[in-house]
Image (cartoon, rainbow, N blue to C red):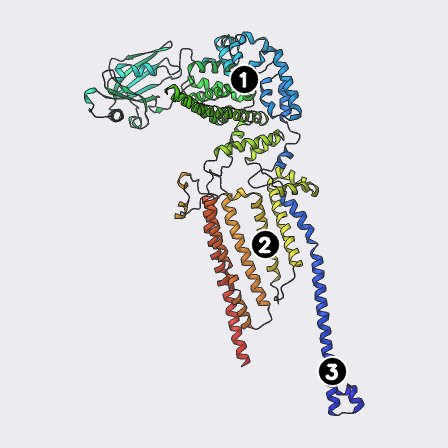
Amino acid sequence: MNFNQCPALAENGNDECSKLRCIEREQKSFAKAVRFNEKESRLLKVSSINRGRIGSFFFLPFFVVFGILGFASPVYFGTVSEDTLRDVGEKSKTIDEETLRQLRQNNLGPAEMLLPLTSLSKRKKFETEIQEKKKQHPELAISGGGSIFDMLTFNDYFGGLDRFNLGRGRFEAFFVYNRATTRGDLWERLKGNSSNDNVQAILRSIPTEGRPGNFWTPLLSDPMVSAFPGVKVAVLEGFSFFPDRRVVLSVGVRTAGEMEGNATEAQIRDACLSDAKAGFGRYVGKAETFLVTKKGSDSEVVKSDHNRSLRNLKTQEYSIRAATLKMGKTGDGGYSVIIGGVIGDDGKLENHGRWLPYPMLVPMMVGTAMSVEKDYYSSDAAFDIGRLSQQMLQGDLASKERIRSFYWAAHQLARKMNFMQMAELTRSCSDLQAVFDLSALVRLRNEPLSEAIGKIKSHQRRTALLPPEQRELERETIVGLENNRTRAEKKFEEDMRIIYAATLLSEDPTGLRGFVESYPVYSKDGDKNATDAALGDVKLAMEYGSGALKHLLARKQPIHRKGPILQLASSVFPLLGGNFLTTLSHTSRSLALFLKLTLLGSAFFALIIFLAKVMPPPEFRRAEGHFLLRWIRRFLLASLCGLITVLALEPTLLQTPREQVSVAGFDFALANLLAYANDQNQMDDEITIVTAIVAGGFLLVQIVIFVICLSRISQVKNEEVKAGLKLKLLDNEENLFDLGLYVGLGGTVLSLILLLVLQVKQDALIGAYTSTLFGILFVAALKIFIVRPYRNHLLVQQADEKRYES
């Protein structure tokens, strides 16, 4: 201390008292300066905190704007947004426009089918116009519409107005075909005047003398065939649907004397069946031969004089694949079983399906020829029908089976709608496969109605055998079954209209069937509900136009249903420029998804920064972690919040549809927890999007925890304390370092709960295993490669400090 500058020494001299007073004065001045500096430091700290808090409000608008844009962006991973459908369907053809088009073309049948789906403002007007045209032209009630030329030639082509079916309200297209075939001269007119090669090919393929396979009954009933055991071969001649074909048979017979007295009929039948199969096995190259010749609508069976040596017979195959053609008791009290089938020149057994009954087949073939002549089928479909008809007569089995299936499909449609309704529908089918797909959809939705009718008929057969007093007791059951049928009929009519309208608007029945069949099913017996939901989505998309429907069928994903929060955000979404994102959701979906995730992540990143600035720092915090680690931690937390938001918007992402089973690539006994685990067919080894989300979510959580631990280690490193205290601080964070294990085990328990509650077998198992696995790996990496080396460094530093102090 410089005493020469002290005023007390200058006045009183250089004595001890003056020096003490000088020291005391200096100490007071120093304490005053320290207090001033502390006050200034506190003021600066408070001012800095206030400035940080005020500046943090700058991030709040970013959170709101980015959050609304990301949250309400109409693009999703597993669903299609209704806003996207509205945007893509703008200015495309609507149901109202399609109904108006049908009415202007005088197609009342299609307009009637579309009427319940039109807008309420125009429905009454359309209905009035339809009724007025029906009164003016009664023929339209049967045909469902047509041009003036169609109505002028109606009496000639169709044999006049069908009063019987008109009175009973039977206006289906099949009855028109049947009337034209049995009463009119449509068949002859087409055969004599049509220059369409496809029409002529269809007419040539029509069986004019009975059913295509009318040789089966005479052949199997012939005593020379059924009464004697052994292998028999019948050569077919004159059967246009079976050119160059043979029938191979093996007969197993047990006479009355060969039967055991106490043997049941089932045991005898099985014994005869075994004998018939063994007959093919004992075949040595010769067999009894028969000649089956077509005689008008009948067949003649003649046995050849000698047995023929036949080659190219795959008898070992026959014993396995041969169908049971006939079984039963013989006239002499014995029992016989006949197995076999039709074979071609190569000797292989062929699968010939069942044709429509003859009274139905001929009208359907004539009606198809007329529809092709009138261009009621597309050019590609008409070409396929003509080509298949021609190749069938040349003996091509594949063509025969496909054209046979076509007539079944066409008959399915012809029994559900009138002539013009079917004509407009088949015209919208681009090819023959589209007709098959359309028929499959109709058959699918008709199953509940067929089941209800079958139950009524079965119950009526049972009650017919009951006494009159018991029949009265069954009346309530009949009433209930009738009510079920009424509801099924109403439901089928609604579904039929949706399928019909969707086909006309999209012109893609194949895509429509693919959408319905690929609709996700999340429960074991949820097929019916899924089909109803699929048609409901189709109906909703049609309200926005044909463009929206085509987009939905192309995406093959359900429509996303908005919750109340999303509804609120969507109302503000267009004001913030969201229309651009809506357009992007269907023009460039990948970019739209990237922007959605980016906006959600940016929103939560801004929120985290806002909260970090606003929240006061803990008083015990003495140091900050590394700058880079702090920002990585915020980024990962924002990413995790964004992932949770995506899962909240699409909770079905955590569920695997029943037909999609993700495969882990390994098998664990834990998989047996599901009761129906063995009922599901597993797909090939592939990771579904659900598996990726589950595993990726647990991985992201572990990364966030890992970065938080690194940040805490960085804070300990920045502490200006001795190494011993840093070691104690690290020991204090031991529970934090084990957090990854705790979260991993918790994720495993949560996954097992989801496995049992949500019935998401494979993906829940993936989550259970990966959660624990990631926890073990990250905690091991943290402690072995981060904490352990740093503790070694601190131990060495602590030893150096002790040596220096000593």
> Mark 3: few, some, or many residues within 10 Å (few <14, many ≥20)?
some
Q: Earlier in the sequence, mark 2 or mark 3?
A: 3
The amino acid at mark 1 is Asn
Mark 2 near mark 3, Cβ–Cβ under 8 Å? no
Res 80 → quadrant? top right
Instruction: For mark 2, give the secondary structure.
Output: helix
Q: Is residue 432 left or right of residue 321?
A: right
Instruction: For mark 3, give the secondary structure.
Output: helix
Q: State the separation of the CA atoms marked 2 and 1.
A: 62 Å
Q: Residue at x 63, y 55 (%)?
A: 608
Mark 2 near mark 1, Cβ–Cβ under 8 Å? no
Report the residue marked by disc 3: 26
Report the residue marked by disc 2: 637
> Mark 1: few, some, or many residues within 10 Å (few <14, many ≥20)?
many
> Mark 2: few, some, or many residues within 10 Å (few <14, many ≥20)?
many
Q: Nearer the viewer, mark 2 or mark 3?
A: 3
Q: Earlier in the sequence, mark 2 or mark 1?
A: 1
Q: Nearer the viewer, mark 2 or mark 1?
A: 1
The amino acid at mark 2 is Leu
Report the residue marked by disc 1: 418
x%, y% of residue 697? 53, 50
Out of 740 and 374, give the one closest to the viewer.
740
Q: Residue at x 49, y 41 (%)?
A: 656
Instruction: For mark 1, give the secondary structure.
Output: loop
The amino acid at mark 3 is Glu
x%, y% of residue 416? 51, 20
Q: State the separation of the CA atoms marked 1 and 3.
A: 114 Å
**Quadrant position of the N terminus in the picture:** bottom right
Q: State the separation of the CA atoms marked 2 and 3.
A: 54 Å
